[in-house]
Image: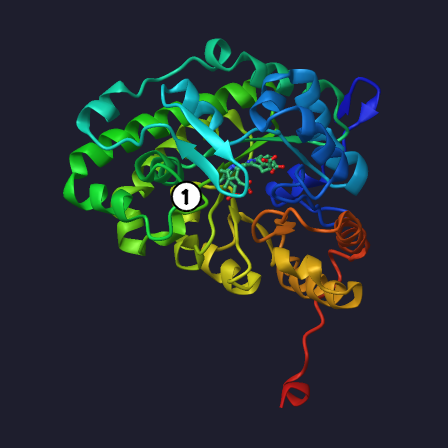
Amino acid sequence: MRNGDVAVNNRFLRACRREPVDRVPVWFMRQAGRYDPEYRQIRETHTLLEICREPELCARVTRMPVDKLGVDAAILFSDIMVPVGAMGMSFSLQENVGPVMDRPLRTDEDVARLHAFHPEEALPYVLETIRHLADTLPVPLIGFAGGPFTLASYMIEGGPSRDYLRTKTMMLARPDLWHALMAKLSEAMSIYLRAQIEAGASAVQIFDSWVGSLSVQAFRAHVKPYVQRMLADLAPLGAPLIYFGVHTGELLREFAEAGATVVGVDWRTPLDRARQRVGSSVALQGNLDPVCLFAPPEALQREVEAVLRLGAESPGYIFNLGHGVKPTTDLAQLQRVVEWVHAFEPHSPAVHPTKEELA
Ligand SMILES: Cc1c2[nH]c(c1CCC(=O)O)Cc1[nH]c(c(CCC(=O)O)c1C)Cc1[nH]c(c(CCC(=O)O)c1C)Cc1[nH]c(c(C)c1CCC(=O)O)C2
């Protein structure tokens, strides 16, 4: 694969497709962010949404971790809330808090007012950024959108939440309204992701970060059909489809069944257990605890290697954190992790302690 004169490193895409790889591919959720002094400097003069709206700057920020860390994929710099604005709900991104809606979504009228959007018309800058990156990056570009539960939770709660009380109450008390909302969100995000792939994203990730707050039964009844529909709509495009949320150990099998081709795993579930749950037809991505990046290098290296041994046991594995890079992380620690992941021999049989050694 080439971009003009640049050869594109495709080990990330090969691993997504469970094909043999020379090295385990690695990228980090939130790999462009406040841990990087250059990013903090840009943020002194631009808000996050301003960066998103300026294709040249947005492409530069997207590319920074590729050049600084040596990761095997870039992820579009944007936010899951960007298309929420295009659907007619205004919000702000508050530092150290997250998205806060100007007016939360609570009533039938609020759901009726939410509208579909044409990505080329409503968010032309996103697609322009993707086109520019797809022509110039030395690694594949991952596009993304928020998952329907996570977007609904911000809309309904009005901001971050601990217990998703209003969201789950709507699900139970007003199933008709809930289903209307899920249908609108999943359809809009599926159109948005399709546009990203058509503009040049090689893979997409659905960040349903907070869906792990649901029981397996609630996920099956109230969310899974919509995720399944999104994934089925996108499957014919041939791009790998990553589905991720935190606290989702019990849901991993459901994610694979819903049609994800790559399942993201947080740090709570060991990757061998995740593999048992999802079967052999999908790839896995994860799952170093982001807090391990605050450990001394020797301790960090042990943790990275422990993750690699479990993850690389079967084909189709992408190294990542179990959630996003924390803002106070040391950039040098991320560089070390990339080096160690790339030094690991993916095909060497994992070294298991013998029964005698364990005894
Ligand atoms: C839940 C969620 C959001 N946004 C996103 C999610 C899903 C991933 C996850 O679970 O973390 C997705 C997201 N947000 C951002 C990206 C960029 C791409 C990347 O490097 O991963 C991605 C993939 C930029 C951003 N989006 C945000 C930042 C924080 C830094 C800044 O304000 O510049 C970044 C880099 C703001 C944001 N936006 C959101 C939150 C919770 C926050 C953090 C608030 C804070 O810590 O100040 C909503």
Please name the residue that numbered disc 1 is placed on: 160
Q: How is the image coloured?
A: rainbow
Q: Position of residue 195 (x, y in %)?
A: 51, 19
Which SS class for mark 1?
loop
Describe residue 187's horizontal placement relative to residue 146 as left or right: left
Q: Position of residue 284 (x, y in %)?
A: 56, 50
**Occupied quadrant, residue 232:** top left
Instruction: Sort mark 1 into few (<14), some (14-19) or many (20+) by Cα contacts within 10 Å.
Output: some
Query: 356 or 141, which is in the foreground?
Result: 141
Q: Residue at x 35, y 40 (%)?
A: 153
Residue 158 to residue 275: above or below: above
Instruction: Determine if the C-beta at disc 1 is less than 8 A from ligand 1.
Output: yes
Q: Position of residue 243 (x, y in %)?
A: 48, 42
Query: 81 or 274, which is in the foreground?
Result: 81
Query: 2 or 66, which is in the foreground?
Result: 66
Describe residue 48's horizontal placement relative to residue 349 as left or right: left
Question: Considering the image in quadrants, where does the C terminus appear?
Answer: bottom right
Dividing the image into four quarters, tell me where ligand 1 lies.
top right
Describe residue 42's horizontal placement relative to residue 283 as left or right: right
Q: Amino acid at mark 1?
A: Pro
Q: Residue at x 66, y 38 (%)?
A: 33
Query: 198 or 208, which is in the foreground?
Result: 208
Residue ranking furthest to the front: 44
Residue 78 to residue 115: above or below: below
Question: Considering the image in quadrants, where does the N terminus appear?
Answer: top right
Q: Position of residue 202 (x, y in %)?
A: 61, 28
Residue ranking furthest to the top: 121
Residue 163, can we see it?
yes
